[in-house]
Amino acid sequence: MPKLSQVPVPKPFVEVFKQTGIKIKQYKAPASFERDLKKYLKRNHVLHLSTCKENTPRSTPLEYRINGLTFYILSEKGGKFINLKNNKKVSFSIAEPYNSEDDYWGYKGMQAWGTAKVYYRNENPKQFKEALKKMGIAKSLKRLGLKDLPPHINYKIIEITPDKIKYGNPREGVFRVTWQRKG
C-alpha cells in the first residue's frame, strides 16, 4: 500500500497563503492524493528522463502517456537506451511554465524515481503491443491517418514504474507531498 508524507506549511507561509487565498489540502489517504496528481499528469505531456551510465548522467525531454501511475514513452533510438541497458534506475521531472516574479506560489512540478523496462517492437512484440494499448496510441495514429506505426522502425517503449514521487502545486492546494509505492 502506498504511503504519503506531507511537509507542514512553515509558519511564515500560513498567513501569506491566507492572504492570497491558497488552501493547502491535508491528504488523509494516498488515493485522494493520486487523484490530484493524475489530473496534473493528464494536462501535461512531456517529462525529462534522467538516465545514467557509469558517471555520465543524461537528461532527455520525452512525450509520455500514463496508465494509472505507470508512465509510457514511445521512442526510436538514442543514448538513453544504452544507459538503460546498464542501469534500469531512472528519475524524471515534469514542470509547467513558471515565473516567480509574476506568482511566487504558482509553481507546479513533480520529481519521480523508479525502475524502467524497455520493450522492443521486434524483440518483445507481445509486451510492446500490450504497452501500446495501455498508452492509447491507436487514437493518435487514427488522427494521423495511420493504422499502425511505420513497420520499418524498431520502435521501443519505456515503461516506468515510480517508487517515489514528490509533487508541489500550492495554487491547487498541494504543498510538498511525497508518495511512496511501498509504505
Image: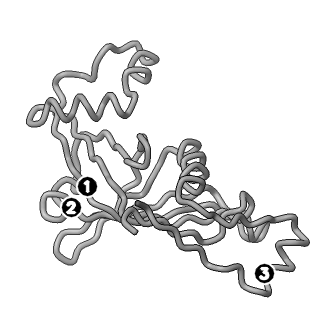
Q: Position of residue 88 (x, y in %)?
A: 21, 61
Q: Residue furthest right?
A: 19
Which residue is painted at 63% across and 60% down in the image? Answer: 108
Instruction: Classify 10 Å Cα crowding around label 3: few (below 14), some (14-19), many (20 and above).
Output: few
Determine the CA span between mark 1 and mark 2. Answer: 5 Å
The answer to which image quadrant residue 167 occupies is bottom right
In the drawing, does residue 140 fall left or right of residue 103? left
Q: What residue type is disc 1 on? A: Ala
Residue 71 placement, left or right of 80 = right
Look at 57% across and 69% down and name the residue there: 177
Q: Residue 59, can we see it?
A: no
**CB contact under 8 Å: marks 3 and 1:** no
Specify few, some or many for label 2: CA neighbours under 10 Å numbering under 14, 14-19, or 20 or more.
some
- Which residue is denoted by mark 3 in the rendering? 13
For marks 3 and 1, the one nearer the N-term is 3
Kindly indicate whether the residue at mark 2 contacts the one at mark 1 (C-beta within 8 angstroms). yes
